[in-house]
Image (cartoon, rainbow, N blue to C red):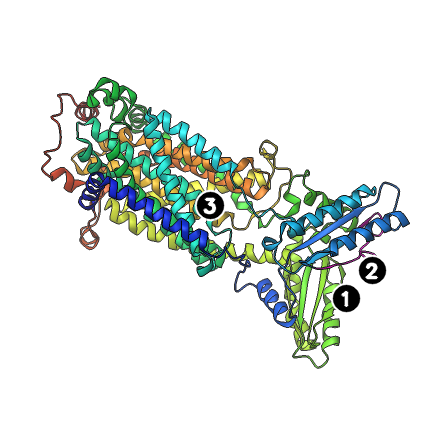
Amino acid sequence: MATFLYRLGRLAFRRRWYVALLWAAVLAVVGLSALKAPGASDEEFSMPGIESQKAFDLIEQRFPGATADGATARVVFVAPDGQKVTASSNKAAIEKAVDELADGKQVAGAVDPFQARAISKDGSTAYATVTYRVGATELTDASKENLRQAVDGARDAGLTVEAGGSALDDQGGAGGVAEVIGIAVAAVVLLITFGSLAAAGLPLLTAVVGVGVSMASILALADALGLSTTTGTLAMMLGLAVGIDYALFVVSRYREERARGRTPQEATGLAVGTAGSAVVFAGLTVVIALAGLAVVGIPMLTKMGLAAAGAVVVAVLIALTLVPAILGFWPDAVLSRRARRSGSVKASAESTEGGEHNGGTRWARFVLRRPVPVLILGVVGLGALAVPMTSLQLGMPGDEAKPTSTTERRAYDALAEGFGPGFNGPLTVVVDARGADDAKAAAQTVSQEIGATKGVVSVSPAQFNDAGDTAVFSVVPSTAPTDEKTKDLVKTIRGERPGIESGTGATFQVTGSTAVNIDIADKVQAALVPYLVVVVGLAIVLLLVVFRSLLVPLKAALGFLLSVLASLGAVVVVFQQGHGAELLGVEQTGPIMSLMPIFLVGIVFGLAMDYEVFLVARMREAYVHGERPGQAIVSGFRYSARVVVAAALIMIAVFAGFIGESDSMIKMIGFGLASAVLLDAFVVRMAIVPAVLALIGHRAWWLPGWLDRLLPRVDVEGEALSRRPDDATEPAPAGAPGDTADREVARA
């Protein structure tokens, strides 16, 4: 592989105009296709196999025209202190607001609280439910503005009015600001790392081109493949992050080869042949992790994973072709200012690209002298952080997790105060009475049995479909939607089903937002172990091929598990237990988002293997070229530590930018990913990995003979390139950086 990529790099360097024009043409074609293609669909969130999803499907089947997942808004009216909403002036203001709420093209109906008896016992609070014919993502600005105007009108009448529900959801996500922060910090890190504006700008430029191609492709294929508007979110975030990292490693290796006296074309070929090989296999590990999301069984998550995997593939192709082409246009621009001013690339680059006393070598020698304390401290520290993960509670935080500055949170609090905490998360029960002799009597029996269950506050009257064989009613729990007692209540109600079915001939299913969240949490929790087995297993096989070692892949996988568990523990400490939550602007703690463990495992595993491949590949390269195990560790850190640190800092900056968002779930994702990258890059890869390799010595690179014969040889370390006659190298001066450093390590 190294030889093929070496030739590809030289070809891209020579034919730089063709390569640049080719990528420009690709960007233009997919961009025009995206503009002409139908818009992305607003795909319904579904999770086949769970009871709440089956209940939704049954409602849509038996109640034609009813949209089980249509947008809703719940407008809460609170009378001034000492007054009641039934007072004539307050009642008139509420009825006027309800009439205005019902006046909209997308509105299916608005329920008058006085007709529906939606008034609290003390008469201080009332609510009106507005239902829409379309989902939340399909609501027009006019519909949302009509809702806001009705609320403002009631407020002007002296009432306290707040609104919650899916109709007010902001579908834009964490857009714009987080990405800008990430790019700005990345630019600063790259400038400090390389000391050159061109070298810092090249990875940013190529990453933006890659993200442009990926996002335009997703938009162009959205209608044909049924992709939703949220599919590209993960692709944009990861495409930007890995695009910068992959270009960073190629440019860094190019500068290193120039420091050794290579001509620009030869340095480009060697950079793509060596660092490019690591980029290919690092990209493959990320693709495996993302494509493995299909194991979870959530269609939307599968599409997000595959779209993000496609963005990673584009980033790899960009790093192997467009980066060397741009180096061909400006071969000296990416060198440090000192190198360009001195006129001697080798002499001035010695201290920056392969210096024998850089921070990486000093840290590596420190670990080599004290491997046991470093290993114990790293493992114990991560283990201590992972302990809170044992109390992990999965759920789907709703309006209660939003800041009190939002109307959704204030509406949630007003309803909880006026009607009880369980009112914000009612359960929906659908009764299938086709097998019963008397459908109405069967539905009544089911309603009475569930209403008598401990933990149920009230049950609404059953509503039948036109055929009279299916009924739907609501159940209000006594506890909040995210309370563990509510989860137990759902399990208890479902556990009563066999007895009720045998006595009535009718069966029922429980759904609603609270039940959906419970079912999602259970399914994700059940899918986590199979997902880990598939992803980690495939990655171990891939790393076996890359490093031709048994222990290195196992060590990489175990280190990843440590960092993921520790980062999950940190998320639990902040977002579930509330320690330090105020520092991040988290106003309400609660369960951890159900998809958080899967997101964390999938994304961080790929990125962790990136650092593993880039760092250990240089050690493997030095070992194959004759260095002893200790020397190889120092050599790997000499050339890779700085760029791995820069890459990790860029990742952390990109993810940490999301912590500043107001949405609690986005904060959680940003904090979890940033902490996972921090722990994996700086504790696992930079401390535990060299400590373990130092302790096991030559055994780190051992592979049974029979397995060695079975595995294909891919030559990631560029051994074939070292045997190739090299007529493109300027004579190296005596005491070249690599020779001097290696002799000192040998003496050490």
Residue farthest along the top direction in this orientation: 342
Give 240 or 96, whichever is nearer the viewer: 96
Residue 124 in sight here:
yes
Amino acid type of the residue that numbered disc 1 sits on in the rendered structure: Pro
The disc at residue 115 is 2
The three-letter code of the residue at mark 3 reads Leu
Question: Going 47% across and 50% down the picture, which residue do you hit?
Answer: 598
Q: Secondary structure at mark 3?
A: helix
Q: In the rendered view, would you say 405 is above or below 454?
A: above
Q: Which mark is residue 343?
A: none
- Give the x, y percent position of residue 587: 64, 37
At horizontal 11% and vertical 39% (from top left) the residue drawn is 723
Judge from the rendering whether residue 5 lies leftward or rightward of residue 610; answer left or right. Answer: left
Name the front one of labels 1 and 3: 1
Give the magenta part as a residue range.
108-126
Determine the main secondary structure of the stretch shown in magenta. loop
Q: Nearer the viewer, mark 3 or mark 2?
A: 2
Q: CA distance from mark 1 to mark 2?
A: 14 Å
Q: CA distance from mark 1 to mark 3?
A: 43 Å
Query: Can you identify the residue that label 3 sits on?
Result: 600
